[in-house]
Image: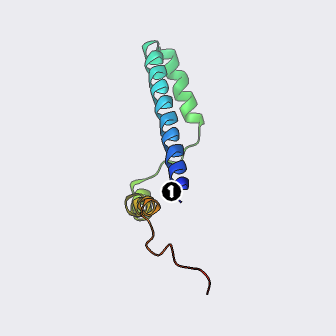
Amino acid sequence: MKTIALIALILLLVWWCVLTVWAISSHRERVRLAASWTPENEVEYQKLEASIPRYRMRPKDYAVAAPFMIPFVLLLLPYYVHSWFVRDPFDRHEHSA
């Protein structure tokens, strides 16, 4: 079980590294494009934004979703990660009933 938890943590670390590199490269690209931004680009950007349908969560939607998200993130996930590394004291009992 510790091996599976270790593999999961390594995959999580690799995923966070990929996200970090992607965020840094996106930020650099955005800074580069912002330096050459023109009013014509602004008009085209407004047209593009108007053409893309988006769902924006209202504060009421966050209030409804928060009771489900907060316990999972703050309570359940650390509990499961902790249980992967803590040894079960009843692990050595025989399963022959």
Image quarter of residue 85: bottom left
Residue 26 placement (x, y as % from top left): 49, 26
Q: Residue at x 45, y 27 (%)?
A: 24
Q: Is residue 96 left or right of residue 59?
A: right
Q: Could you say which is closer to the camera, residue 10 or residue 17?
A: 10
Q: Which residue is mark 1?
A: 2
Q: Is residue 18 above or below residue 84?
A: above
Residue 81 placement (x, y as % from top left): 44, 58
Q: Could you say which is closer to the camera, residue 11 or residue 21?
A: 11
Q: Is residue 60 above or below residue 43?
A: below
Q: Residue at x 52, y 40 (%)?
A: 15
At label 1, the amino acid type is Lys
Crowding around mark 1 (Cα neighbors within 10 Å: few <14, some 14 to 19, many 20+) is few
Q: Residue at x 48, y 17 (%)?
A: 33
In the rendered view of the protein, which quadrant contains the N terminus? bottom right
Residue 88 placement (x, y as % from top left): 45, 70
